[in-house]
Amino acid sequence: MGRLLNFATACLILGIGSFARAEEAKPGNVDPSLPIYKLVRSLEDVQDKIVSGDLTAVDMQRFMIGMIDRRLRTASPDEFNDLRNVDAAMIYAMSGGNPATLDTLVSHDARGNFDTRLTNALLMYLGGKGGSATKTLDEIVPEYKSTTIGPYLALVAANVIMQKKTDLALKYFDWARLSLPGTIVEEAALRRSLIITVKQNNVETSIRLARLYLSRFPNSPYAAQVAEQVITLVDAHYQQIGNDRISETLAWLDPPRQQELYLRLARKAAVTGRFEFAHWTAGKALALSDGKDDNPAKLAQLYLNLSSLPTADIAEVKGAFAKIPDEILGPDERRLRDAGAFVLSEVERQPTLDSLTQARPAITGKDKPAADSPQGAGAPPASPDAKPNAAKDASPAQPPEAKPASAQPPGKSPAVAKTAAAKPGEAKVQEASDEKDSIDTFLSDSQTQLKAIDELMKKGDK
């Protein structure tokens, strides 16, 4: 057993072969005389494996960070006469290590092996005060450009200034990723560069960075952050990018992840009424199901039906909605389906006589109330907290004069009766006006309700 553990440790130090799992490796089995820089190289190798998609290395990373932390705290001052160990301590701190350990090393550095400008800037950054280190980092990044820690330092400096000095940050990110290709440094630099360019609405550069990332790190656990940026970019600029370039960019992902992104794009497009784009993205998602009637396929069919509402056969779409089980839909998808069903029900609803008279007739000069009457134009609005006057100061409201029953045909509204009493030519004009009022009212009410649904869906996206 001891030989096996020693062999696993040797593989770890050399960066070859398979790693022992964190549960099997024990700190006591690590030779305390191993050089610090070799341990840190192994940590870098583990982290590079993680961004390449080897999630079994996550536990090993945790173990390595803890082991290096103990090794640094027990190291003798003479070990830092070797500047490779000094650089290794810096890289450890910038790779998720314990900032307090770096602070301890600096406080015990009587020989001046550590550059206090650099360590102070790093400790401010790692302590959440990177803004205070901006000036120092601007000075030392060019100075350390050709050293082992140069790419890491450029990454740190770019993170500090990426909100205010975007062009310089992109320059630092580019230099860092080109210096260490295929590593976690390149992965982080590409991912954060994309955040900047998407925010800038720089479509061409964003597409190029997205393709680089997805082609080089498609299985990274951080790829979900890039996917969010791609969705934001495509959703805002899909017409400029075009369907072909969208397909080419997402083609680097495996089919399940492609399908997930197409479904998310289809949902956003359906909510915002971009039916043509929603139809295309939903169709791409459905094709990736490869004929399987699984949940993603059902969701894709939902978005296809929603995007087809303006031109689809009503009975066919209603039948498709009915086949989608509630259990596969989240709250937002249910609201989308219900919104589609509402639109279909409104299209199918038969008009009634009452719906033809929703618009109030215009008041002619003959029918206007007198200016000194309570209904007159000069009457002030009633106060909501006004008390009723005494009975002697108020007179009962006079009911309107009732017209004989024969003046209004039974079962007809006043507007219909007015139309019937008019001359033939006038009746046709009145009927056309009533019909137009009815259509306008229906469209206005429907648009108001659909806007309310859209607002609810947008809140769900946030």
Image: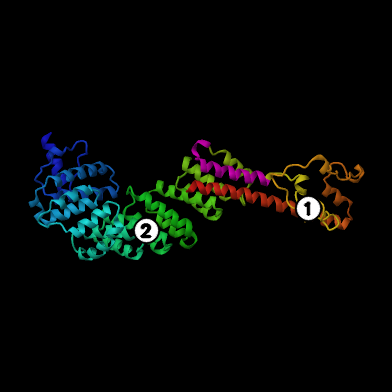
- Which of 198 and 127 lies nearest the eye of the viewer? 127
Q: Main secondary structure of the magenta part?
A: helix
Left or right, residue 174 beside residue 69: right
- Which of 97 and 426 lies nearest the eye of the viewer? 97
The residue that label 2 is drawn on is 194
Left or right, residue 394 beside residue 312: right
Q: Mark 1: few, some, or many residues within 10 Å (few <14, many ≥20)? A: many
Element carrying mark 1: helix
- Which of 280 and 195 lies nearest the eye of the viewer? 195
Element carrying mark 2: helix
Q: Please, which colouring scheme is shown?
A: rainbow
User: Is there any visible trace of residue 438 in the rendered image?
Assistant: yes
Q: Residue at x 44, y 57 (%)?
A: 233
Does 403 sit above or below residue 206?
above
Outermost residue toward the left in this view: 78
Verify whether residue 47 appears in magenta: no
Q: Residue at x 16, y 37 (%)?
A: 26
Left or right, residue 368 beside residue 208: right
- Which of 62 and 76 lies nearest the eye of the viewer? 76
Q: Quadrant of the N terminus?
A: top left
Label number found at residue 14: none
Q: CA distance from mark 1 to mark 2?
A: 56 Å
Displayed quadrant of residue 153: bottom left
Verify whether residue 340 appears in magenta: yes
Q: Do residues under tags 1 and 2 come within 8 Å of each other at their CB atoms?
A: no
| Total count of labels | 2
Specify the segment rendered in magenta. 326-347
The residue that label 1 is drawn on is 434
Disc 2 residue type (three-letter): Leu
User: Is there any visible trace of residue 18 in the rendered image?
Assistant: no
Disc 1 residue type (three-letter): Asp
